[in-house]
Image (cartoon, helix red, strand yellow):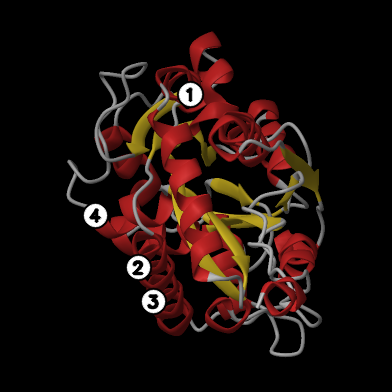
Amino acid sequence: MLACCLAVPAHAAPAPYPQRPIRLVVPFTPGGSTDMVARVVADAMAAPLGQSVVVDNRAGGSGLAGAEAVARASADGYTLGLGTISTLAANPVLMSPSSRLDPARDFVPVVALASIPSVFSVHPGLGVHTFGQFVALARSRPGQLNIGSSGVGSIGHLIVLRMNAALKIQLHHIPYKGQGPVVSSVLSGETQVLSDQYPSSAAHVASGRLVPFAVAAQQRLPALPQVPTLRELGHEGLNSLAITWFGLVAPRGTPAAVVQTLNAAANAALADPAVQEKLQAMGVQALGGSPQRLQEMMEESERTVREIVQEQRIQLPAGR
């Protein structure tokens, strides 16, 4: 009997996840709002996971390069992606069928990380200081006020279209190659109106080089208590569209237990007072919650994008 017992092979229990560092793919260049949020959360996830989370910037194709890197990675929990409203909601609608990814097919949601408010501002030369003044001026000068975006079919472009429809104005849209040139254009006076994430406009607002007239946020920003939200002003649809959100996704097929471990680690990171302080300093609101919350955000944003594309009959340039 002893010999028989010794002959039975011992089956070792699988090693607990994770056993090595985790890669977090950010689909944009370093230094922007997306990258900043990713690095704050990645650093804080290391403690509950017991492994480091290393940010890997994969810019290109309006976020498509980074999203593809995640979709094609092994579904073992060692590659995550930072998804945004652009990569998880807009690109699937706006890109050609041959190049776009399908979030429902290619990714599994892990957690909603954060949302970033946008600020709507003008060049000080316009002499505008309030939302009412802006709307009145824009209506009196149809097609004469310029506003930029990071490209035709970008979220910024959709915001311009929604602004024109909701406010009954006719801003002239100018596409640029990235949001950096968009901000530069209004500072130089080439354009007069700007829709931008608050963290990248904050310094210019504080210096007086940009004059804010509205924000897209759940509530007024502590740094701009005098500036109303678009929700307060009766434009809920525009308010929701202009709030940028981020979430963690994993390749489709990642085991449910691994997703749950990552979700718990991210929620623990977002609950850390030090993390909340860093995010709040950037004007960022921590979210968290279940994977289902991120799934619902993705679906709602995609519906909104489809509605705008259909309403405006957007024609995208060849190759998009």
Left or right: 135 in relation to 302: left
Q: For marks 1 and 3, give the CA distance.
A: 32 Å
Q: Which residue is mark 2?
A: 296
**Residue, far top:** 207
Q: Nearer the viewer, mark 4 or mark 2?
A: 2
Which residue type does callout 2 highlight? Glu
Closer to the camera, 167 or 262? 262
Q: Residue at x 81, y 53 (%)?
A: 59
Q: Which residue is mark 1?
A: 275
Q: Residue at x 46, y 64 (%)?
A: 161
Which residue type does callout 4 highlight? Glu
In terms of sequence position, does the residue under pointer 4 or pointer 2 come before the other?
Answer: 4
Q: Nearer the viewer, mark 2 or mark 1?
A: 1
Left or right: 136 in relation to 69: left
Which residue type does callout 1 highlight? Val
Closer to the camera, 47 or 171? 47
Closer to the camera, 191 or 166? 166
In terms of sequence position, does the residue under pointer 1 or pointer 3 come before the other?
Answer: 1
Q: For marks 4 and 3, give the CA distance.
A: 15 Å
Crowdedness of circle 3 by 10 Å Cα count: few (<14), some, many (20+)? some
